[in-house]
Image: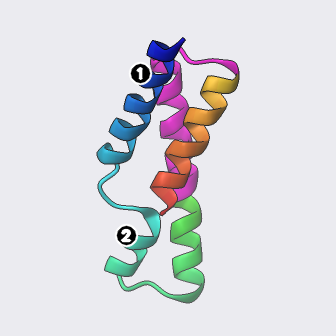
Amino acid sequence: MKAILIAAALVFAASGAAQAESCKAAAAAKKLSGAAESSFVKKCEKDAAAACDKQAAEKKLSGAAKTSFTKKCVSDAAG
């Protein structure tokens, strides 16, 4: 059981490291504001959620492990 938890922690750390730039940081780098910023961040977060779901499927996660992984992955991407 401990080995699974350690492996899960390493996966979460690796997924956060793989995300080089958050959605909010990308919007700031593009100097977006107002409605343009909101729209960009919303689309970026939606794309991140799809990518995180795909990663969870590749890792063959299900149930609580998938939910936890996806939630952490999306929050890291959103910044």
> What is the quadrant of the N terminus in the image?
top right
Vertical position of residue 10 compared to residue 24: above or below: above
| Image point (34%, 79%), residue name | 30
Verify whether residue 47 appears in magenta: yes
Q: Provide residue 33's location: percent of width, then percent of height.
A: 50, 88
Q: Provide residue 17's location: percent of width, then percent of height.
A: 31, 46
Q: Distance between the residues labelled 1 and 2?
A: 30 Å
Q: Please tell me the numbered disc located at residue 72.
A: none
Residue span colored magenta: 44-63
| Image point (50%, 43%), residue name | 73
- The residue beneath circle 2 is 26
> Residue extending furthest front?
2
| Image point (50%, 48%), residue name | 48
Neighbours of disc 1 within 10 Å: few (<14), some (14-19), many (20+): few
Amino acid at pointer 2? Ala
Vertical position of residue 38 compared to residue 6: above or below: below
Q: Do the residues labelled 1 and 2 touch (CB within 8 Å)?
A: no
Q: In which quarter of the image is residue 18?
A: top left
Verify whether residue 4 appears in magenta: no
Neighbours of disc 2 within 10 Å: few (<14), some (14-19), many (20+): some
> Which is more N-terminal, label 2 or label 1?
1
Q: Looking at the image, is mark 1 or mark 2 nearer the viewer?
A: 1
Instruction: Please state which of residues 72 and 27 is positioned toward the viewer in this rendering.
Output: 72
- The residue beneath circle 1 is 7
| Image point (47%, 53%), residue name | 76
